[in-house]
Structures are given as structure tokens and as C-alpha cells.
Image: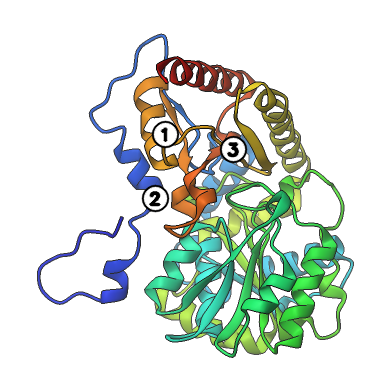
Amino acid sequence: MPAAVPKGPVAPALAEALAPPVMEARAWLAGRAFPADRPLLDLSQAAPADPPPAELREAMADALLNDPKAHGYGPVLGDPALRHRIAEDWSAAYAAPIAPEDVAVTAGCNEAFCAALATLAGPGDAVLVPTPWYFNHKMWLDMTGVEARPLPCGAGLMPDPSEAARLWDARVKAVVLVTPNNPTGAEYPPALVHAFAELAREKGAVLVLDETYRDFDSRGARPHALFARPDWRDHLIHLYSFSKAYRLTGHRTGALIAGPDRLALAEKFLDTVTICAPRLGQIAALHGLRHLAPFVGGQRAEILARKAVVEAEAPALEGWELLGAGAYFAWLRHPFDAPSSDIARRLVEEASLLLLPGTMFTPPDDPLGRSSLRMAFANQGPDGLREAFRRLAAFTTAERRAA
């Protein structure tokens, strides 16, 4: 629903944008007590439940106490040591040369997206966004007067490049892909990512590729070879977040990789909004890249184990369908006539389960949004997930009996 507006002048686009969906869902919990034998299971938000590992917290504490630079302004595009390390590691990961001058450090991946789009599109322009979409992407486009043109996903929750070409016109400046996907968990095959990159190149536009959840891709292989293209800087922007791999959600550290000419434009945006990404988060990210590869590997193994639980439990739910699962998320189609927004509220009341309705990730008239829910399964261990599916089964049985 639209956010409430104050008296007096307001910016129309901001007033009409969605209220933050996670906060809206959390408001359903206000004043509510849950039974002792059925405590709340929160499967709403994609955030690690635990703090950073002790080694990383110790490094951050040392910097906080002993490094004066941790408290001052830094370069707008990020600390040089971190930019160099990202370039080095990404060059190895993608088997292609990426220079430090191609790297900017941002206050989280959301800011990376906003900075990228600020260089690409303005009021009256359009961007193709597969649906279900990540709601913060939609919100930012709405706030800035850029049309978020829906690109409905098909089988396997995959966007179709031929459908994107059909929807493309002169107003479209970019197409946005998130893989592994938030909210559906779908992992896009390299050939699909390449097809979208080629479409963007043909149209003189840009592919914005959000790989926030790259570390948790179940395939374990290089997700694409786009950085090996000699002209990638003209048609590709890559986004990344350190929040998940190192549990740095509150320290807001992300990365934006693009050509230096585009980063020069992004620098104007970043200097105006935050001046520089938080220094302590940058120190933590650099320490993580230097020392915590085994920790990230362990995190990946835990997430894949939780994904396996979801894939094992979901088929037993009568009438439900698991449409996607990967990284932090599962996308489930429910069997009820009511819209997912009603089902999600009732799950809080009757099952002590907090999931987000698909309507938060789709246009209002989208039937997939009405019939689906997002489960952020990274927030619970295997036992908690099994309990969540038991509660979904009990809820479903009660609904069938009531009908």
C-alpha cells in the first residue's frame, strides 16, 4: 500500500511508492503474543541470523580502537586497498581482467543499484525488470520517475530474452537481472545471462546484473563469462553485497563494477548521498577477502543444506508447489482461493509463521503474486524449517476441513 504522507508539500513519486514491505509485514506482529509451544518462526527477511564471526569482529574492534582512518571520510569510490582486492579476486573468479578502476565500494548493494540506475535512466525512461521483482529495485525506479516495465518470468521462473525484446522500445535503457534470484531463488543459467547481455548490447543499453547471492549458488561453477568480453564496460554493470558472505548487514558494504567512465558518473551520486561507504564495513570486507574464504565456504554449505531441507519437505505439502529454491529463498505456490496477502497474515495468526506474500514482489494484477509466498529459509536451521513445513501442513489441513 502507498506510504502515509505528511501535510504540506510532498514529492509525488515518493509519496506513491510502496511502504517498505518487510516493515509492513513486521507490523503484523505488533502487540501479538505467540504461544509458548508455537513461537514465531520468522521467514520474512533475507538476513543472516548471527553476527560476523569472532575473528572478523576482533579485526573490526582493533580498527575501531587503533586505526584513526576508520572514523574519517574516505575516497568516494572506496578505499584503494579494498578496490584492488576486489579487482584481484573478481578477476580470478570470472577468469577475466577487472581493474581497480572498474570497482566502486558502496554503502550496501541497494546503494550500488541506486547509483548504477542514476547513471542510466531518468524520468520518462524505462527499465525491464523480471517479475517477481526485488521490491527495493521497484521502489527506487518509482521514486525516480523511471518506469519499471514488468518482464513476467515463465517456466522455472526464468525471464525470456525474446519476450524482453518484444517489450523493448526506445525508452528502455537497461534490463535488470538478479541471480541467484531474490525473491524466487532461481539460478539463471550462463546461456540465459549471456542472451540478456547480448540483447542489451544490440540495443545500445546495459545489463545490470545483481549477484548479491553469488556465494550461495548451488552449481559451484563460474556463473557467466561476461567479463571476458572486450566491450563489457559498455554494456554491463555488476552489483555485489558483502552483507551475506560475512554477516555485515548492518555495516552496509557493497560493490559496483563498471567501466571507469560510468563510475565517474556514479561518483557524483555517491558523493551526494553518503560521501563514502562506512569505513568499518570496508575494513571488515577487506579482512574477509584476505582471510575468511573457509568461513564463506562453510556458510555456503549451511545454506545449501537448508535448501535441501526445503526441497525435501515441500513436495509433501498437499496442493502446494515449490516453484523455485536457491540462495536464501524459496518461492511457493499455495493452493487456496484467497490472495497471498491474506494467507500471509493468517499464517501469522494461526501458525506463528511470518512469510512474505507474492503480492509484495509483483504488479497488482499479477496472478503469480496472488498465488505465491516467499520463504527466506536462510533465517532458520534445518529443525526450524521442518517445523515451518509442519505448520504449513497443519494450516492446509485445517483449511481443507473448513472448506
Q: Residue tagged by mark 1?
A: 343
Q: Is residue 154 above or below residue 146?
A: above
The residues tagged by marks 3 and 1 sit, at their Cα atoms, a distance apart of 12 Å
Q: Residue at x 56, y 55 (%)?
A: 132
What number is the disc on residue 332?
A: 3
Q: Is residue 181 above or below residue 399?
A: below
Q: Residue tagged by mark 2?
A: 21
- In the rendered structure, the answer to whether residue 167 lies left or right of residue 41 reads right
CB within 8 Å, label 2 to label 1: no
Kind of residue at disc 1? Ile
Q: Residue at x 42, y 65 (%)?
A: 139
Among the two numbered marks 2 and 1 on one chain, the one whose residue lies closer to the N terminus: 2
**Residue 113 lies in what quarter of the image?**
bottom right
Q: Give the x, y percent position of residue 212.
A: 64, 56
Q: Secondary structure at mark 2?
A: helix
Among the two numbered marks 3 and 1 on one chain, the one whose residue lies closer to the N terminus: 3
Q: Is residue 274 visible?
A: no
Kind of residue at disc 2? Pro
**Residue 18 lies in what quarter of the image?**
bottom left
The residues tagged by marks 2 and 3 sit, at their Cα atoms, a distance apart of 18 Å
Q: Residue at x 44, y 21 (%)?
A: 399
Q: Residue furthest left?
A: 7
The quarter of the rendered structure image containing the C terminus is top left
Q: Residue furthest front?
A: 403
Among the two numbered marks 2 and 3 on one chain, the one whose residue lies closer to the N terminus: 2
Q: Give the x, y percent position of residue 162.
A: 74, 72
The residues tagged by marks 2 and 1 sit, at their Cα atoms, a distance apart of 15 Å
Q: Nearer the viewer, residue 228 or 277?
A: 228
* Image depth: mark 2 or mark 1 in front: 1
Q: Give the x, y percent position of residue 356.
A: 46, 41
Q: Secondary structure at mark 1?
A: helix
The quarter of the rendered structure image containing the N terminus is bottom left
